[in-house]
Image: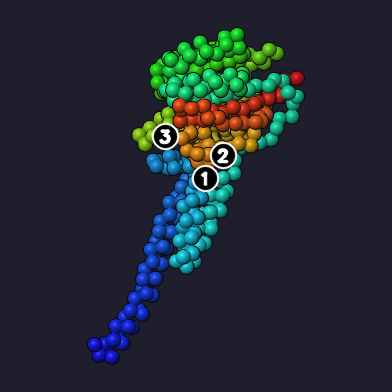
Amino acid sequence: MTAAAAGRQEDRAEGGEPARRRLRSRGSACLAALLLTGVTGLLGFRVADSDGFTPVPQLLAFLPWLLAPTVAALLLAALARWRIGLVWGVLALGGVAWFLEPYGRADAPDGPAVAEIRVMASNVEFGRGTPGLVDAVRKEKPDLLFVPECDYTCSDTLRDELPRAEYPYRSGSEASGAEGSLIVSRFPLKKASGIPGTLGMPGAVAELKDGHEIRVQLAHPMPPLPEQVGVWRSELAGLRDYAAAGKGGSTIIGGDFNATQDHAAFRDILDTGGLRDAARLAGSARTPSWPAALMSPLGTQIDHVLATPDFSARDARFLEIGDTDHRALVVDLTLHRQEQDR
């Protein structure tokens, strides 16, 4: 090889490394742009107060975990030295952080305490989690128990295993599989119509010792499966209408809402019905309840206890009961006397 040919080959080799760096930089920038486009699109629906269409409702349930792709996009933009991407990423990160804040009011009612009520909500997944629920009830001793997906066997087990002297009252939708649901109570229950739905959503009116009545309603709308988003939205609207119809009275709604605070249809229940999320009031607003197989803090909170503003809340806990894909929620509510009650 001549000296001139060797020099030309060395020049080409030296020019190859910058070209490879430029190629890697473009790849990093493209991947960052792809991630930020997805994050920004979801944030757009959240800002617009809309649940959109599949896959938006499904992804909105995990909105807090948009932090991961947003941070990854920022790192990729930094590697690529892409200034627009860095600014875009910072704005997206700020948007996600903004919506991490718990939604809804958290102020305590002013009136004196009337009654203490411990509430438990536990989806037992086709009845499979019933044995664990029985153990949890014996330990936690709730006054009101909401049990979505309580099939015939679950209903019979709770009747046989829970002391009848302590839990003599129930209101349920007797059915197999996910369609069965049950409310169990220490307080006398008067019949109520409940809410029509694909899955059982029974209701009742609980009568306290002082004569105060509380509307109680189990929530279990259809999940937002790709082919069922319309049904999911409609059944959440049914819960919203139920809450709005009881304004001025005491109401507790508990169960598996298949929705989080990042779903517009769920926020509409709070806003229109004047309800507040008990976990939010008690400081556990982002604790995940599903799927239980994932380690906390992974997952999302779709199990809730909602109450009217005459309730305060404390000590909200999410319990592993076993053999179900949901964690049970236990929260202590205090009913306060309002001005109109005096």
- Labels 3 and 2: the sequence-earlier one: 3
Q: Residue tagged by mark 2? A: 286
Q: Residue tagged by mark 3? A: 224
Instruction: Tally the marks.
Output: 3
Image coordinates of residue 185 in percent, x first then y, are 58, 15
Residue beneath the point at 49% across and 51% down: 68
Q: Which mark is residue 196?
A: none
Q: Marks 1/3: CA distance?
A: 18 Å
Asked where in the image residue 284 lies, by quadrant, the reply is: top right
Q: Is residue 302 above or below residue 130?
A: below
The residue furthest front is 1
Image coordinates of residue 137 in percent, x first then y, are 57, 20
Mark 3 vs mark 2: give the one in front: 2
Look at label 2 and name its amino acid.
Arg
Res. 238 visible in picture: no
Residue beneath the point at 53% across and 19% down: 134
Mark 1 vs mark 3: give the one in front: 1
Look at label 1 and name its amino acid.
Pro
Dots 1 and 2: beta carbons under 8 Å? yes
Dots 3 and 2: beta carbons under 8 Å? no
Asked where in the image residue 55 lies, by quadrant, the reply is: top left
Q: Residues within 10 Å of mark 2 (few under 14, many from 20)?
A: some
- Labels 1 and 3: the sequence-earlier one: 1
Left/right placement of residue 83 relative to residue 279 reads: left
Q: Secondary structure at mark 1?
A: helix
Look at label 3 and name its amino acid.
Pro
Q: Is residue 51 above or below residue 173?
A: below
Q: Marks 1/2: CA distance?
A: 9 Å
Q: Residue tagged by mark 1? A: 64
Q: Secondary structure at mark 3?
A: loop
